[in-house]
Amino acid sequence: MNEYDFDLIFKLDDRELSDNCLDSLFDAGCDDATISIGMKGYLGLNFCRNSNDIKTAISTAINDVLKVLPHAQLERAEPDLLNLSELAFFFNFTKQNMRKYARGEITSVTNQFPKPAIAGKTSYWHVAEIAQWFNEQSVREINSSKIDTLFALWSLNQANDILHQPNPEMTESFTSLLKSVA
């Protein structure tokens, strides 16, 4: 058995959240989660779940929540997309050091830092890609279980995005287009 750490954020019907539901979540199997209620209408759970594999850990966590909150919708799984400051904190680097890796200013690495998933004034990277890159460059050793977890969370978010796409036909059309030019 391995221990997997991940966060799940659910969007709730305003009437679903009560003090009783928090106790019910504990009784339903979420006794390995820290529950946070920050923004109205959302529930965050930070799981530290023991399981044979990450897929089982995530799926049982989601099912445990849905037993108590059947109308809850999974919004996101985290960590997935992080900016440079968040990456620095996550990997226990300074912001300046992380910025140097991203700009290619560290001469001891041979491969280019991964491209951001979202580029802009504040750019965001998939933390799974950065963890894998750190391993490949011998910058920081990240255990394979942690990397598997990060890639699973990224995949879960992609699957969730596909379920909630605004126009499935257009998405399929663009997917075909991209496959033909790649």
Image (cartoon, rainbow, N blue to C red):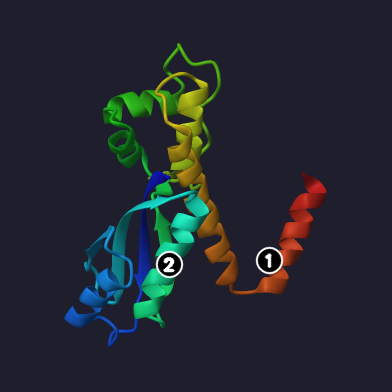
Vertical side of 21 occupied by 75: above or below? above
Q: Give the farthest residue toward the bottom.
A: 15
- Numbered tag placed on residue 58 in the rendering: none
Q: Residue at x 82, y 50 (%)?
A: 180
Q: Residue at x 50, y 49 (%)?
A: 53
Vertical side of 142 occupied by 29: above or below? below
Q: Give the farthest residue toward the left.
A: 19
Question: Real-space Cα distance between discs 1 and 2?
Answer: 26 Å
Q: Quadrant of the N terminus?
A: top left
The residue singled out by tag 2 in the image is 62
The percent position of residue 69, horizontal first and vertical second, equals: 36, 80
Q: Quadrant of the C terminus?
A: top right
Q: Residue at x 35, y 38 (%)?
A: 87
Regarding residue 119, the answer to whether it shows in the image is no
Among the 4 quarters of the image, the one containing residue 38:
bottom left
The kind of residue on which mark 1 rests is Thr
Regarding residue 93, the answer to whether it shows in the image is yes
Vertical side of 107 occupied by 167: above or below? below
Q: Give the farthest residue toward the top.
A: 108
Tell me if mark 2 has few (under 14), some (14-19) or many (20+) residues whose alpha carbon lies within 10 angstroms of its own.
some
The percent position of residue 111, horizontal first and vertical second, equals: 55, 21
Tell me if mark 1 has few (under 14), some (14-19) or many (20+) residues whose alpha carbon lies within 10 angstroms of its own.
few
Q: Is residue 17 left or right of residue 169?
A: left
The residue singled out by tag 1 in the image is 171
